[in-house]
Image (spheres, helix red, strand yellow):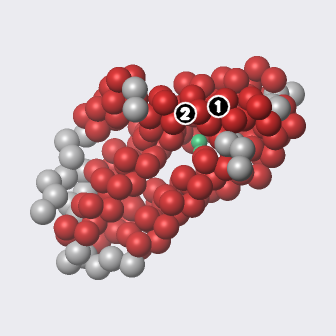
Amino acid sequence: MARDILKTLKTEHDELRKLFAEMEDTTDRAKKTRGELLADIEAGLVPHAKWEELVFYPAFRERADREGQKAHAEAVQEHRAVELTVLPDLKTKPTDSVEFAGSAKVLGEFVDHHASEEEKTMFKMARKLFSAEELADFDEQYEAWKGSPQAAREFANAMKQPSPVPVG
Ligand SMILES: [Fe+2]
Ligand SMILES: [Fe+2]
């Protein structure tokens, strides 16, 4: 089967949705599980969002019409809200608190909303704006990028922001 960046990104959205559903099922006593789930969520979310910001979104914007450019601007703003507020706020909450549970739910709802909008608007448009070959190329680039020093730096930076809640 041909590689396809849009399928890869959609699969990653679904993996994140699954992790948030698991998080929602935890109790305030599940300190260790919550810490592990948060680490899995960040490991899935951060490289995905960074690569979209660095490669996919700019390429999309260049070819998009006004409606597409608006969808792009909206997506960028949602990334900023998660990166600067929603995720850092969650990380200040102790994992065994009800505040953590509430904040994790907000992050999950935010990510689901954002991912659904990408799937319904940007990805749908991208199918028309890019050839199958280009979508396959993006998919290869994304896989290579995930193992790159730049990806590692982006991840380390994202992890640095608020002091992480100790896990254990
Ligand atoms: Fe995104
Ligand atoms: Fe995405």
In x, y percent, where is residue 89?
A: 34, 49
Residue 96 shows in this picture: no
Is 103 left or right of 9, judged from the image as shown? left
Badge 1 local density, few (<14 within 10 Å), some, or many (20+)? some
Q: Which amino acid does label 1 sit on?
A: Phe
Quadrant where ligand 2 appears: top right
Residue 44: tell me if it is visible.
yes
Q: Position of residue 1 (x, y in %)?
A: 71, 50
The label on residue 157 is none
SS for tag 1?
Answer: helix
| Quadrant in which the C terminus is drawn | bottom left
**x 81%, y 40%: residue:** 127
Whether residue 108 sits left or right of residue 140 in the image: it is left
Amino acid beneath label 2 = Tyr
Q: Is mark 2 within 8 Å of ligand 2?
A: no
Say whether marks 1 and 2 touch (CB < 8 Å).
yes
Q: How far apart are marks 1 and 2 (CA)?
A: 6 Å
Q: Which residue lies furthest to the top in this view?
A: 62
Q: Name the residue under label 2.
A: 142
Q: Which residue is at 44% across, 34% downward?
A: 146
The circle drawn on residue 138 is: 1
> Tag 2's secondary structure?
helix
Tell me what residue is drawn at x 59 percent, y 33 percent: 140
Residue at 82% x, 32% y is 131
Residue 101 location, x and y as percent? Answer: 34, 68
Dot 2 crowding, Cα within 10 Å, few <14, some 14–19, many 20+: many
Where residue 105 sits, quadrant-wise, is bottom left
